Image (cartoon, grey):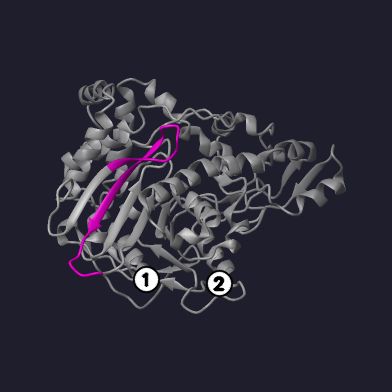
Amino acid sequence: MLIPARVCVSQILGPSRLGIRLEYTTTPLRLFTTTTCSYASTKNSHSFPKSWSFRESTVQWIKSFNFSQLKNSQDQLLSRALPYYNKRVNGLLAKTSLVPVDSNGNYLNELCIENESAEDGKTQNLVILHGYASSLGWFYKNFDDLIRDNTNTKVHCLDMLGFGLSSKPKLNFDDETNGVPLEIEFDREKLDHHKHVHKALHLPESYTIDASNWTRYVKGQKKLVTSVESTYVDSIENWRSERGIESFDLLGHSLGGYMSIAYALKYPNRVNRLILASPGGVERSPYAISNPKMKQLIENVGESGKIKLKPSNSPGEYGFLGRLPTLKRRFVKFWQNQHSFFTLLRLSGPYGPRAISAYTFKRFTRSGNISSLDELSLFTSYIYNSFTTPSFSETSIMKIFAPPVMAKWPMLDRIDQLQCKTLWLYGQYDWMFNITGQICVDQLNGRKGVEKGSEAVFCVIPNAGHNVYFDNWRGFNGEVKKFLGWR
């Protein structure tokens, strides 16, 4: 069992109207080999419907044909969260803009929030990148608390290329590789539950990889992954250059966390500090094209042979199968064929927004963060409208990640090159394997020459899942501000 090198404790400060009761304790709670604080919360006392009615779903579907509907939803959501949206109030100003990032007319949608001060001082810039199937508005709970008490600061939240209101160029990466999907064989009827690592981890006794399949799988994969990463990373760098920002602190969630690491590796002089909120693509796995042992294993069995391996329950080892043993075969094929889930949503007519509302009405009311049906409906409308326009970004994740949402070129094999201080944040109930963050911190802090005060930090945010910044935004913001030295 891994012993944390350093684990921080979050304080959750919630108004009584949210039904949150604080319980401070000096006894650590062991959970997934991490230490976190303990507190109790009651169920959301507000009553919400299970979803939009069919009539309301039909109205939302019809509205979505108006291409300005997403912009309208974004403006309404941000106006509700930020009293200073599009107007300066006591030195605070929030506004959105479309920032050009290349000569082809592509642009990134940016929300810039600034807190001016009469005092002279260097402006601190924090850039925020969202995850897959998300956009900048998902952080609406975080913005005001992050910046209100911190003068001479700017928060820049971006829609990554192909997401939200950023441009959606027609890109095709298929010519980058002739590789085929990797087929991993194992007995699905005999799985051991490794719940001491994660409740979703079930592993077989062994698994098999066909040597010829591996050889065809790895062909061109590194070039493909690099090409996809560069599409996002270079657009962020071009945004930085256009905005005239020398360097900044960078916060990324999920896919945005993966791209944040990729950016920090490619442009190390631009990132001061790196905050990774449940980042994707970190774990090692059999899909890792960077596995140094595969060449020798293939030589041992020959091109026509099969390689039999023992799985591992550690995300730091190449035998880690993650969720693969419990994935439905049709999901795996759907992913390997790179079909967009959102195409089905768009073809569902009024049932599309109703399905989205059924998810959001259940998912985002658990913690009590949303106490108003109007707010919930507005957020749901914003989410639905962000899916109504097709984009290459819907399937680009399938080119760099395998079906269990594990990277083909995992960041664990690359983070040793990071030159900045890092904070790794996961939710207590994260569907990601949050032990991965601890492994990364141990690996980073084990490098030679790590100076005191520049160590990587790992933290689990209580009462939060994968959307850690939303589920417990107070605890999340508290750790971010502490790491940045903000108030």
Quarter residue 351 falls in: top left
Amino acid residing under circle 2: Asn
Q: Secondary structure at mark 1?
A: loop
> Which mark sits nearer the N-terminus, 2 or 1?
1
Specify whether 13 is left or right of 274: left
Residue corresponding to mark 2: 445
Of badges 2 and 1, the one in the foreground is 2
Q: Secondary structure at mark 2?
A: helix
119 drawn magenta: yes
Q: In which quadrant will I find the C terminus?
A: bottom left
Residue drawn 35% across the image and 78% down it: 26
- Residue 60 coordinates in the image, percent (x, y): 24, 26
Span shown in magenta: 97-120
Q: In which quadrant will I find the N terminus?
A: bottom right
Amino acid residing under circle 1: Val
Q: Is disc 2 surrounded by few (<14), some (14 to 19) or many (20+) residues within 10 Å? A: some
Question: Height in image: 91 above or below 343?
Answer: below
Tell me, for residue 9, which label it has, or none: 1
Residue drawn 27% across the image and 71% down it: 23
